[in-house]
Image (tube, rainbow, N blue to C red):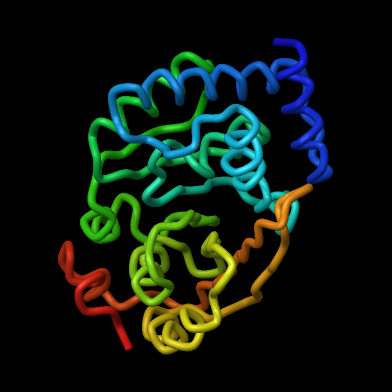
Amino acid sequence: MEQKLQYIVDKIGELNIQINEKQAEQFFRYYELLVEWNGFMNLTGITDFEEVVCKHFVDSLSIISTKDMSTVDNLIDIGTGAGFPGIPLKIVRPDLKITLVDSLNKRINFLNEVITRLNLKEISTVHSRIEDFGKNKEYREKFDFVTARAVAHLSVLSEYLLPISKVGGKCICMKGSNVEEELDTGKNAIKILGGKINCIDQFELPESDISRNIIVLDKIKNTSAKFPRKAGIPSKEPLK
């Protein structure tokens, strides 16, 4: 186990992020729970220890190495699935207030178990379709940082994320290697929803040839109350 803990420390260290022994143990326990629960529900197709560390944990934490989050108070992770990037971010930044949103209750049950077992504080889960969540006055335009990892095409994703970002906040869209077409077709949707593209950070995961892109959107004005549209419509009829 000591070797695995050191592996976690070393790999995360390649992002210039230093973690302590307790945090390494939390990541290892997270890995164990992921594999355990994956035995009876579909959380991830990746279960090899080293792959989980690199492709899930390190990938999730790439936000910290590419964006200044020193002034961020609250963060919401949309379509979080097995908790990426939200839970790795919480382990490394325990001061952050984090909300995890997912539409599948079984995944919410898993996330609640992880939160309990890892003794994480000021992190909550919400079982909701994102279109419904974005209409809720309790959450709408309330968050500094809105994240999503491999959730939807940018034109669709913008309709999920921008309505819950506060004006002056940022939406962090974590993508794979090919984003040119998404950027081209998503620009107008982003504008309609009150956002603009700030930057695109391209990088490779440490010691790999796996390419990633982080598209950062700035929320520059309030989103019209008609967005997001009803559940299912954004994905069927993306804004153009």
Residue 59 position (above or below residue 39): below
Residue 59 at x, y percent in the picture: 63, 47
What is the quadrant of residue 56 in the picture?
Answer: top right
For the point 35% across and 22% down, which residue is it? 39
Tell me the quarter of the image containing the N terminus: top right
What is the quadrant of residue 191 in the picture?
Answer: bottom left
In this rendering, the count of numbered labels is: 0
Residue placed most toward the observer, 98 or 29: 29
Residue 114 position (above or below residue 148): above
What is the quadrant of residue 192 in the picture?
Answer: bottom left
Judged from this view, the residue extending furthest toward the top is 1
Residue 53 at x, y percent in the picture: 64, 34
Residue 188 position (above or below residue 122): below
For the point 78% across and 28% down, which residue is it? 9
Residue 128 left/right relative to 1: left
Residue placed most toward the observer, 231 or 98: 231
Residue 93 at x, y percent in the picture: 66, 35
Residue 69 left/right relative to 239: right
Residue placed most toward the observer, 133 or 175: 175
For the point 41% across and 45% down, which residue is it? 80
